[in-house]
Amino acid sequence: MSTPTTPGWYDDPEDDSQLRYFDGVVWSKHTTPRSTRPAASAAQPGQQQYPGQGHPPQYPGQGGTQAPVQGQPPAQAPAPPTNTGWQAPPPREQHPQFPGSQQGGWNAPAYGGMQRVATTPDGQPLASYWQRVGAFLLDGIIQFVLMMVLGGWFLFKGFEPVWDELTAAMDSGDPTAFDSITTSNVNYGYLIAFGVVAAVITFAYGVFFLSRTGATPGKAAVGISVRLRDRPGVLSVGDAAKRTSLQAGLSLLGNIPLLGNLFSLMALVDLLWPAWDERKQALHDKLAKTNVVIGKQPRS
C-alpha cells in the first residue's frame, strides 16, 4: 500500500479491521475500528473515499461503524486527533495598559504622600544641612587664614612660654625634663587678644558679605544664600549684624579658661541645630529671623 500524501484516516497498514490517522508526515498512534469497506473503485488504493468529503463518517462510540447510505451524505467524519505533531504557539499575552502608560511599557503611577520640600513661607526652597556644612567649612578656611595673618602673632606670644620649655627639654637630652612642661605657663592675655581678633574677623566677614550679596564666599560657592524668612532680598546691615553676633560672641567666649568649654559646646549645638529643626534654622537664624535658602538673593 502506498503512503498517503495528505492528512486523514486511512486503512491501517498493520490491521485491516481498523483505520489509522496519517498526520501528513507519519502514521500516528490514533486508530478507530470499522465494519465495512467502501467499493475499491470509489477509493484510491489503501484509502477510504467518501463522497463530498475527505474523511470517513463519524462512528458512534458503540456498535462499530456504519457505512454511508447510497444517495445520502455521510455523517460527519471523526475529527482529526489533537497533539499529533508540532503546533504553533499561542499568541503572546497582551498585558493590560495602565492609565497614562506608554504603548509597550509601563510608567510608575504618581504616589501621594511624598516628602514635602521645606520652603520659606513664600515658597523658596531651603538649603539642605549638608550644603550648610560645606559652606561653613569653606568659610572657616578663609577666616582661619585671615586670623593667622592678622592675629597669629598674639597666638604665638600666648604659647611662647610653653614652646620655650619644650625647646629646653629637647636640648637637655633628659627624658624627665618633658614631665615638667605644663600649660600653666600659657600667657592667657595674648590668647584673649587673639580671641578678640578672631571674633572681630568672624563678625566683619559675615556682616560684610551678607549685607552686600546675601551670601558669604563659602555659601556662594555651594549655591545658597541668606534672607529674612518672611521676605526675600539681601539682608540689611542690622539684620546681618544680628545674625552674626551670636557666632562671633560664642567664638570670643570660647577663649575664656574653664568656661570656654561651655561656650564652645553651645557653638557646636548652634551649628547642629538645623539638622533637626523643622524650619532648618540654626540658633543664630532664629535670633535674626533668617533662613538659608537655595539660590541668590535679588537686590532691593
Image: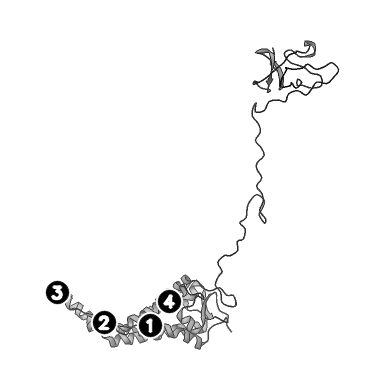
Residue marked by disc 2: 159
Rendered-image quadrant of the C terminus: bottom right
Give the farthest residue toward the right.
Answer: 71
> Identity of the amino acid at label 2?
Phe
* Label ID, residue 145: none
Q: Earlier in the sequence, mark 3 or mark 4?
A: 3
Q: Earlier in the sequence, mark 4 or mark 1?
A: 1
Picture layout, residue 31 above or below residue 234: above
Picture layout, residue 298 above or below residue 49: below
**How far, Cα to Cα, is label 4 from label 1?**
12 Å
Picture layout, residue 158 above or below residue 55: below
* Label ID, residue 251: 1
Question: Tag 2: Cα neighbours inside 10 Å, few (<14), some, or many (≥20)?
Answer: some
Q: CB of mark 3 within 8 Å of CB of mark 4?
A: no
Residue marked by disc 3: 176
**How far, Cα to Cα, is label 2 from label 3?**
21 Å
Question: Tag 1: Cα neighbours inside 10 Å, few (<14), some, or many (≥20)?
Answer: many
